Amino acid sequence: MSKLIRQSIVSSLLSYLGVLVGYFNIIWFFPYVFSTEQLGLVRVVQDMALLMTPFAQAGLRQSLLRFYPRFEAKGEKTSFLSFIFLGGVLSYVIFFIGFELFRPYIMDLFEERSAMLVEYVHVVLFMVFILVITGLFEGYGQMLFKVSVPNFIREVLLRLFLTILTFCYFKQIITYDLLVNLIAGAYLLAFLLLFIYFIYLKVIPFQFKIEFPERRLFREIIRYGSIVVLGSSGSLLVAKVDSLMVASMLGISEAGIYTTMFNVAVVIEMPRRALAQLTAPIVSTAFQQVKIRKIKALYQIISINQLALGTLLFIGIWANLDSLFYMMPKGDEFRAGKYVVLLIGISKLLDMATSINSDIISMSKFYRFNLYGVSIIGLLTVVANIIFIPIYGLNGAALASLLTLGIYNFIKLIFIYFKFKMQPFGFNTIKILIIGALAYYLSTLIPRHPLALVDVGIRSALITLIYVPLIIALKVSPDVNRFYHLLVSKLLHFVRK
């Protein structure tokens, strides 16, 4: 557990370094440089590529995570990895052919209100290929517990590349058209850095002779990948389809506002993203070794740790949101998405509180459940957006995300409880929610400072000084308390020296 916590702390710190870059872009630089329409196009191009990637990857990353321990134990990991990466290329070719066949029908959805997007489909398709291969390398890195550097490349360097491109456009070094095309180049550069890192580790997973798994196991991998691709696609559909439907139904400018506010809220789930890369291989190995108690312990402690940190981030963002609008160029335009932050923030908290339920199901013999559950929820997401966006606009898309993600997590909780007799909640869950509500309420009692940046500093400091000591004093999380005592002991040792 200590290795998991240590790795997750490093990954989270790197993720939040990326958040600093991302917030500079989201809150100030991008709104200052781009119109909401231009910003919407930049965001939607990336979201569309992310949404298509699971279909093009065909469940191979999840297959790598599930079957790698079995092949490693047999001494056949190199041939298995070669098979997976070859499969990644072939699955993208099949996806590309299918997309080209249905391109006219897909583009008709955006022709009326987001015609700019149609001009850059080639960028989306190239990005999908890069994301497919990058995802397989990152999955392999997960199995090696090498996630810090890939996180740094994805969360920090990639954001820096996009910042540099935007600066070049701002200085009229490149045109907007070239900037959009070079977004795919930024993802390619990030992949090349990842590839160089694997060369440095001397773990490039290729050999010239590719050996296919035995027929029974080959069928099992194909069957698992086919089922998981629908599950992972549905999960991403729940997470990303809202921005595409906003672009389709309201316009690319509104999509710019929505995706910006969505990205303000999504910071809350950064700890979950860091942990997710580490827990999947642990859960996979635990199931192979039939260590259900280990999974149960992981299920509960990750729920508490994620909820504790997520709640602090959520109340900090919501308490300071009005000040953020004052600091943003075109802040009045983006204020239309204020409640997007609230609704998406709550949905992310729910996702974090329900812990690693997706990993538990995906790595168990009940992995087919994800197919049925996600298929239903994916359809429900589309229907909910169709219903709520015309009524509530941007807030309708966020409300649809909250409802569908909440329902999906509730279904998974019930399923895991009945199949494995485990659930992630306890009295400490209630403690966190009470402490968070108290810290937020007390922060609302202080008057606002006329300088927005100063107000953010004062309000954030007050929330932290109330929230963190209470979390430690009430012993909500053993890991938080261990980290606190370790930090104190190191500080005392430093002072005494």
Image: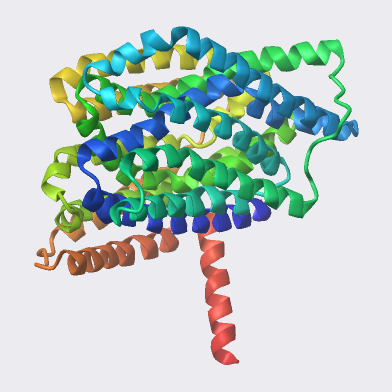
Check the image and report above or below for 45 versus 107.
below
For image coordinates 22% across by 68% down, the residue present is 458
Is 353 drawn above or below residue 465 in the view shown?
Answer: above
Return the x and y of residue 104 as percentages of the image width and height.
38, 9
Residue at image position (39%, 58%) is 20
Horizontal side of 179 relative to 154 (left or right) equals left
Which residue occupies the foreground of this view, 338 or 204?
204
Which one is in front, 275 or 416? 275
Numbered disc total: 0
Residue 150 appears left or right of 388: right
Residue placed at 29% from the left, 54% from the top?
Answer: 170
| In the displayed structure image, the side of residue 365 where residue 22 appears, left or right | left
Q: How is the image coloured?
A: rainbow
For the question of whether residue 349 can be seen, the reply is no
- In the figure, residue 211 lies in which quadrant? top right
Quarter of the picture containing the C terminus is: bottom right
Relative height, residue 231 to residue 267 (above, below): above
The answer to which quarter of the image holds residue 471 is bottom left
Q: Return the x and y of residue 358 as percentages of the image width and height.
A: 54, 28
Q: Position of residue 356 (x, y in %)?
A: 54, 35
Measured as percent of width and height from the top left, residue 457 is found at 25, 67
Q: Residue at x 72, y 35 (%)?
A: 286
Q: Is residue 64 visible?
A: yes
The residue lying toward the viewer, choosing from 231 and 49, is: 49
Outermost bottom residue: 497
